Image (cartoon, rainbow, N blue to C red):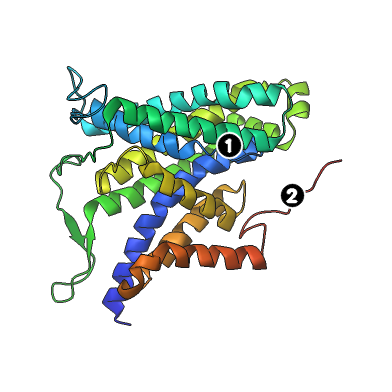
């Protein structure tokens, strides 16, 4: 294999995998606290992209209730990105209050929570389609400022061109991982989150309000989903209301590969899955997703708890 081709595929894999990692971190946070998978996470991912699109001055298409609609004002892209992610986080809180909390209060089986979140995802996606249609929306080419379209990581004679937006995505991922790791491991909030994740009842006896930290967890999870949705939308496009569904499936694969509830595992799993897809030969590109999930299946057979996951002890 040509070294330049290897290096380009490696860098592309890191960029793809970093998006998977950001997305999967939201899954991981909710699972670590509640022990359930939030199947509506992909819908929040989509919402975040749409929020940023309209806040940055985007115009909706010809279909839907908001056809040809736009806001009377617009924000610079980076401000719109933050605001859109915050709105996605708030939407995630509403999701928790409506789809998770009622079942949690009743002590319902976790399987019912999965079904509830799946139903919420269907409602969100169909609401988006009803409001803005199913058109593909794209961000302007210059949203990141006057930066070159691609960066050469090679030489003049053997260029290795990587799109600038891919470099930005990878950089943002690393910053998010560092901040989240610091939050969880080095702050009082993080210690309280770990206490709630370990035992909600004991944490409440120690003066910690579990409900507050569950709400915080969903907000951070939604914020990360909205951030990832916008980054993907800026890299390719917002491919309709259902474009977060595919990332939802990939995110599930990432957290299983890295280890359920493990933040480092989500990052490593995302990067590995991205690299696996990047190194699939062009002749087999149609089977890229099948190959990556085949690797996941092999991992499950060899190490069911994932790379960095721990065997879960069933309390009786």
Residue 79 shown left or right of residue 176 in the figure: left
> Where residue 175 sits: x, y (%)?
40, 45
> Where residue 153 sits: x, y (%)?
24, 65
Quadrant the N terminus occupies:
bottom left
Image position of 22 with respect to 128: above or below:
below
Residue at mark 2: 312
Q: What's the residue at 38%, 71% (across, down)?
A: 280
Tell me if residue 194 can be seen: no
Q: What's the residue at 50%, 22% (across, down)?
A: 94
Q: Which mark is residue 30?
A: 1
Quadrant of the image occupied by residue 217: top right
Q: Residues within 10 Å of mark 2 (few under 14, many from 20)?
A: few
The Cα atoms of the two marked residues, 1 and 2, are separated by 16 Å
Image position of 210 with respect to 227: above or below:
above
> Where residue 287 sits: x, y (%)?
40, 67
The one nearer the camera, 148 or 276, is 276
Residue located farthest toward the right when viewing the structure as drawn: 316
Residue located farthest toward the bottom when viewing the structure as drawn: 1
The one nearer the camera, 112 or 171, is 112
Image position of 35 with respect to 171: above or below:
above
């Amino acid at each position: 294999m040509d070294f330049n081709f290897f290096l380009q595929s490696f860098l592309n894999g890191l960029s793809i995998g970093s998006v998977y990692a950001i997305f999967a971190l939201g899954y991981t946070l909710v699972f670590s606290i509640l022990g359930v998978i939030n199947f509506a996470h992909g819908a929040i991912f989509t919402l975040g992209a749409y929020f940023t699109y309209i806040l940055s001055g985007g115009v909706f298409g010809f279909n839907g209730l908001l056809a040809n609609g736009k806001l009377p004002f617009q924000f610079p892209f980076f401000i719109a990105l933050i605001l859109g992610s915050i709105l996605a986080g708030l939407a995630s809180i509403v999701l928790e209050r409506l789809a998770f909390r009622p079942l949690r209060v009743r002590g319902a089986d976790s399987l019912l929570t999965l079904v509830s979140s799946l139903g919420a995802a269907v409602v969100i996606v169909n609401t988006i389609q009803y409001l803005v249609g199913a058109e593909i929306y794209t961000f302007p080419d210059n949203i990141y400022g006057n930066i070159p379209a691609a960066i050469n990581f090679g030489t003049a004679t053997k260029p290795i061109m990587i799109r600038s937006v891919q470099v930005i995505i990878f950089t943002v991922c690393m910053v998010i991982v560092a901040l989240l790791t610091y939050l969880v491991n080095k702050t009082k909030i993080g210690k309280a989150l770990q206490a709630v994740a370990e035992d909600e009842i004991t944490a409440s006896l120690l003066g910690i309000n579990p409900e507050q930290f569950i709400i915080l967890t969903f907000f951070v999870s939604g914020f990360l989903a909205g951030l990832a949705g916008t980054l993907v939308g800026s890299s390719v496009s917002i491919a309709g209301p259902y474009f977060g569904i595919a990332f939802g499936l990939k995110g599930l694969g990432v957290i299983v590969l890295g280890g359920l509830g493990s933040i480092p595992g989500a990052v490593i799993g995302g990067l590995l899955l991205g690299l696996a897809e990047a190194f699939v030969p062009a002749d087999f590109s149609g089977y890229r997703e099948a190959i990556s999930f085949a690797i996941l299946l092999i991992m499950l057979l060899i190490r069911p708890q994932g790379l960095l996951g721990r065997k879960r002890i069933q309390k009786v």
